[in-house]
Image (cartoon, helix red, strand yellow):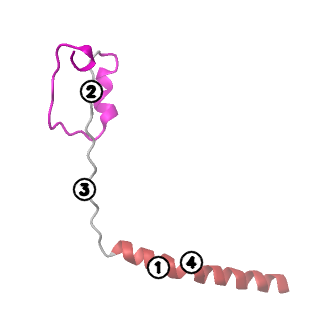
Amino acid sequence: KTFNDLHHSVTVVGHHVKNLHEWASDFYDSPLLFTWLIERPAALEMDWRLPIIAITVLIATPLTIKWLVARDKSIREL
């Protein structure tokens, strides 16, 4: 017995594509069977922008909440 009970096979190694569905669209009605090896993309490199954004959000969120609560209190007192 062979894989999938077929007698012939073709192996393609190292074919990198960005969009698997687009690349395989010509073969939807074909008896060909594809097995995909999906690799994770390279790790993102951290630069200074992401920590700055995180710290800004970390500081701005409680300050904004405090400001909104104070504003709502002053509006209710009117």
Could you tell which of marks 2 and 4 lies nearer the N-terminus?
2
Q: Position of residue 10 (x, y in %)?
A: 15, 22
| In magenta stretch: residue 29 | yes
- Tell me what residue is drawn at x 27 percent, y 22 percent: 33
Residue 15 found in image quarter: top left
**For the residue labelled by badge 2, is the local secondary structure a helix, a strand or a loop?**
loop
Numbered badge on residue 56: 1
User: Tag 3: residue type?
Assistant: Ala
Which corner quadrant of the image does residue 47 belong to? bottom left
Mark 3 and mark 1 residues within 8 Å of each other at the beta carbon: no
Assign the N terminus to one quadrant of the image.
Answer: top left
Residue 41 drawn at (x, y percent)? 27, 52
Give the residue at mark 3. Answer: 42
Q: Nearer the viewer, residue 14 or 49?
A: 14
The earlier-in-sequence mark between 2 and 1 is 2
Which one is in front in this view, the residue at disc 3 or the one at disc 1? Answer: 3
- The residue that mark 2 highlights is 34
Binning the other alpha carbons within 10 Å of mark 4 as few (below 14), some (14 to 19) or many (20 upward) gives few
- Say whether disc 4 or disc 3 marks the residue closer to the N-terminus: 3
